[in-house]
Image (spheres, helix red, strand yellow):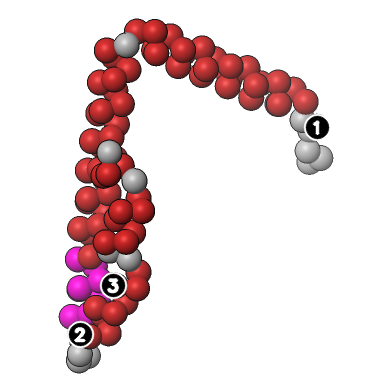
């Protein structure tokens, strides 16, 4: 899916494009700052919507395949065991 990759969005609305657009806004006052804020809000909203769409797609795929759900539960259990073993292996910090 194209929308789940961040490279597409970085190329479409990159920092260089935003900086170039802000330089073209002439004059003093709040206009350049409002323009940057609008870009930030729109970009953040689009990013959040993209993450929600990707999460919904992944959830739908996992719910349709019970075997995949079982493997994910085993994997998360192994991660917790590894974290516990790492905690046991670590040395206490001096107070």
- State if disc 3 and disc 2 touch (CB < 8 Å): no
Single out the residue that lies furthest toward the front. Answer: 1
Question: Quick check: can you spot residue 64?
Answer: yes
- Could you say which quadrant of the image residue 43 lies in? bottom left
Q: Position of residue 52 (x, y in %)?
A: 25, 36
Which residue is located at x 58 percent, y 22 percent?
A: 79
Q: Residues within 10 Å of mark 3 (few under 14, many from 20)?
A: few
Q: Please tell me which residue is depicted at 29% across the width and 55% down the height of the picture.
A: 9
Q: Quadrant of the C terminus?
A: top right
In the depicted structure, whether residue 52 falls above or below residue 58: below
Q: Which residues are magenta?
A: 29-38
Instruction: Where is residue 35? Give x, y as percent.
Output: 20, 73
Q: Quadrant of residue 80?
A: top right
Which residue in the structure is indicated by mark 1? 91
55 up-or-down from 63: above or below: below
Q: Secondary structure at mark 3?
A: helix
Quadrant including the N terminus:
top left
**Where is residue 56 drawn, in percent x and y?**
25, 28
Disc 2 designates what residue?
A: 25
Q: Which residue is mark 3?
A: 18
- Image point (25%, 28%), residue name: 57
Measured as percent of width and height from the top left, residue 75 is found at: 52, 17
From mark 2 to mark 3, how far is it between C-alphas? Answer: 11 Å
Verify whether residue 30 appears in magenta: yes
Q: Is residue 83 left or right of residue 75?
A: right
Comes first in the chain, label 2 or label 3: 3
Q: Main secondary structure of the magenta part?
A: helix
> Which structural element holds mark 2?
loop
The answer, for residue 30, to whether it is visible in the render is no
User: In the rendered image of this protein, does residue 1 appear above or below residue 76?
Assistant: below
Q: For the residues carrying marks 1 and 3, which lies nearer the camera in this image?
A: 3
Q: Residue 53, which numbered label?
A: none
């Amino acid at each position: 899916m194209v929308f789940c990759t961040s490279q597409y969005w970085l190329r479409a609305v990159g920092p260089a494009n935003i900086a170039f657009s802000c330089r073209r806004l002439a004059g003093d006052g709040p206009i350049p700052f409002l323009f940057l804020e609008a870009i930030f809000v729109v970009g953040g909203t689009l990013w959040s919507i993209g993450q929600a769409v990707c999460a919904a797609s992944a959830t739908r795929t996992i719910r349709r395949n019970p075997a995949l759900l079982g493997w994910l539960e085993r994997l998360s259990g192994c991660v917790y065991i590894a974290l516990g073993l790492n905690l046991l292996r670590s040395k206490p910090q001096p107070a």
